[in-house]
Structures are given as structure tokens and as C-alpha cells.
Image (cartoon, rainbow, N blue to C red):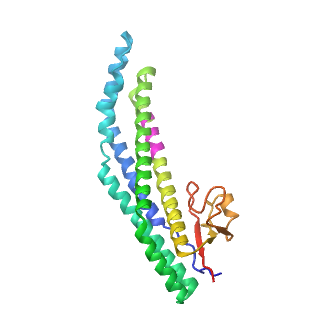
């Protein structure tokens, strides 16, 4: 049994790129929403007055057409798909280069190293399903992020109509909604890069003939207790822990260090 002595590595720069991309989306939502604050408050005043006389069912359509849709129009599906594909390719490249270094460090220019690296190279040609799944999953997460914001904004406008929020209070409530999607964007970015790294690591290691791995953590304060006790222990790819292999739990940054058979 052979393992590399290399220090722990994690694609932190790729994670930061994705978080930055998602924060650009939320930044545009923030700007577009606050730039439309006067228009939003005009709708509030209009329907507050109408409701003094009778219930008006046109509010949903007007909020959607005049406020929500223009705010969400910032997100081009083409640009989104292109960015997700670029991020996926960055993760794939990172994982393969890391495994090349792990293999070289553990097997030391032997025939086994040559054979193992050949398997790794061959495995790169059958990854379309992984890429498509990554893109689809993240498109859905970003769509849910914007839809959640849409629903919160709509409810905030309705509350302002029903409970008589002054304009300053309406602005404060909108900012609270924006803060919550900022946090959600960061969660998506961290979680999805860790998950993609973990999945590709498993795929490539199994193609390389590695049936087991050593669990490695970041050894910092963010490591969850259940993962801290796994540090340095051996696990098998066909027998995952209760919350999955490294990278599968939410926001997991742990790594599976490959174990090479003699």
C-alpha cells in the first residue's frame, strides 16, 4: 500500500471565483431593486389607496410585470451556462493535476506510475455526464436563489401595502432580503465546488484502480467534529460514511488522498 506525502490541497481559488460570480448576481439584484425603490413605493401607495375601497387582484400581475421581471432580467442563461462550464473545467483540471502529483509522489517513476497515469488520462474522455449534471444542478440552485428573492420581495411589497410601512421601513425590509441572498450565494459557491471536487476525485481514483483513500481535513476551526475524527483514517469508495465521501456533506472541504495498491 502506498500513499503520497504531499500536503493537503484544496481548490480555494476556484471556490472564490464561483462565490464572486454569484455575488455579482446578487449585487446586480441589489442595485436594480434599490434603483426601483421609488417605483416600488408608488405601487405600494396605489394599492394601499385602492384597498381602502375594495380588494384588488391586479397587484400580483403588476408587481411581476413592472418590478420583479425587470429586476431578474439581469441573468442571461447563456452567460450563466458559459460560466458554469468554465468553473467545471477548472475543477476538473485541478483534480487531475492534483492526482498526477499524488501519483508521482507515491509511486516514484515506476511502471505502476506510468500505468496509473495512463488510466487517469483515459478517464478524462468520458466526463460529459458529470459536466452536464454540474451545470444543470447549479442552474437550478441559482434559479431557486432568484425565485426565493422574488417571493420575498413580493411578500415585502404586500406587507408594506397591508401594514402601512413608510418608505424607509420598506427599504430596510428589502435590504434584509438582499442580505439573506448574499449569504445563500456564498453557501452555494462553497458547497458546489467542494462537492464537484469530491465527485471527480472519486470518479478518477476508481478509474485509476484506487479502491480506498485516506480522509484529510483542512485542520482548521471550520472542520465539523464528525469529520475531524476521520482525519488520517482509511475509507473505501464502496462503503461511504453516513454523510458521504469527502466533499459530499454541505460545505465540506475535506479531501480523499488516494491509496495505491502494491
Q: Quick check: is 179 in the magenta stretch?
A: yes
Magenta highlight range? 173-181
Tell me the residue at 44%/51% (across/down). Answer: 137
Give the x, y percent position of residue 151: 43, 34
Seen in the picture, residue 61 relative to 54 is either above or below; the reply is below
Seen in the picture, residue 260 relative to 12 is either above or below; the reply is below
Can residue 38 be seen at all in this image of the molecule? no
Where, by quadrant of the figure, is residue 102 drawn?
Answer: bottom right
Tell me the residue at 44%/76% (across/down). Answer: 121
Q: Quick check: is 155 in the magenta stretch?
A: no
Residue placed most toward the observer, 10 or 108: 108
Give the x, y percent position of residue 164: 43, 21
Give the left or right position of residue 206, taking residue 148 as reference.
Answer: right
Secondary structure mainly formed by the magenta segment: helix
Where, by quadrant of the figure, is residue 175 drawn?
Answer: top left
Give the left or right position of residue 203, taking residue 21 as reference.
Answer: right
Amino acid at each position: 500500500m502506498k500513499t503520497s506525502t504531499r500536503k493537503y490541497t484544496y481548490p480555494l481559488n476556484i471556490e472564490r471565483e464561483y462565490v464572486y460570480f454569484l455575488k455579482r448576481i446578487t449585487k446586480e439584484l441589489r442595485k436594480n431593486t434599490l434603483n426601483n425603490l421609488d417605483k416600488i413605493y408608488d405601487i405600494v401607495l396605489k394599492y394601499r389607496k385602492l384597498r381602502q375601497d375594495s380588494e384588488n387582484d391586479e397587484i400580483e400581475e403588476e408587481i411581476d410585470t413592472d418590478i420583479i421581471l425587470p429586476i431578474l432580467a439581469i441573468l442571461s442563461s447563456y452567460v450563466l451556462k458559459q460560466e458554469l462550464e468554465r468553473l467545471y473545467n477548472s475543477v476538473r483540471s485541478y483534480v487531475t493535476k492534483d492526482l498526477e502529483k499524488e501519483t508521482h509522489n507515491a509511486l516514484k517513476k515506476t511502471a505502476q506510475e506510468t500505468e496509473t497515469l495512463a488510466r487517469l488520462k483515459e478517464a478524462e474522455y468520458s466526463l460529459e455526464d458529470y459536466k452536464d449534471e454540474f451545470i444543470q444542478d447549479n442552474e437550478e440552485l441559482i434559479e431557486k436563489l432568484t425565485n426565493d428573492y422574488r417571493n420575498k420581495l413580493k411578500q415585502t411589497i404586500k406587507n408594506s401595502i397591508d401594514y402601512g410601512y413608510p418608505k424607509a421601513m420598506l427599504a430596510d425590509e428589502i435590504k434584509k432580503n438582499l442580505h439573506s441572498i448574499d449569504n445563500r450565494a456564498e453557501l452555494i459557491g462553497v458547497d458546489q465546488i467542494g462537492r464537484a471536487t469530491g465527485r471527480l476525485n472519486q470518479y478518477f481514483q476508481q478509474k485509476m484502480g484506487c479502491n480506498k483513500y485516506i480522509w484529510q481535513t483542512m485542520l482548521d476551526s471550520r472542520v465539523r467534529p464528525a469529520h475531524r475524527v476521520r482525519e488520517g483514517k482509511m475509507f473505501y469508495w464502496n462503503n461511504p460514511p453516513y454523510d458521504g465521501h469527502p466533499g459530499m456533506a454541505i460545505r465540506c472541504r475535506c479531501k480523499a488522498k488516494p491509496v495505491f495498491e502494491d
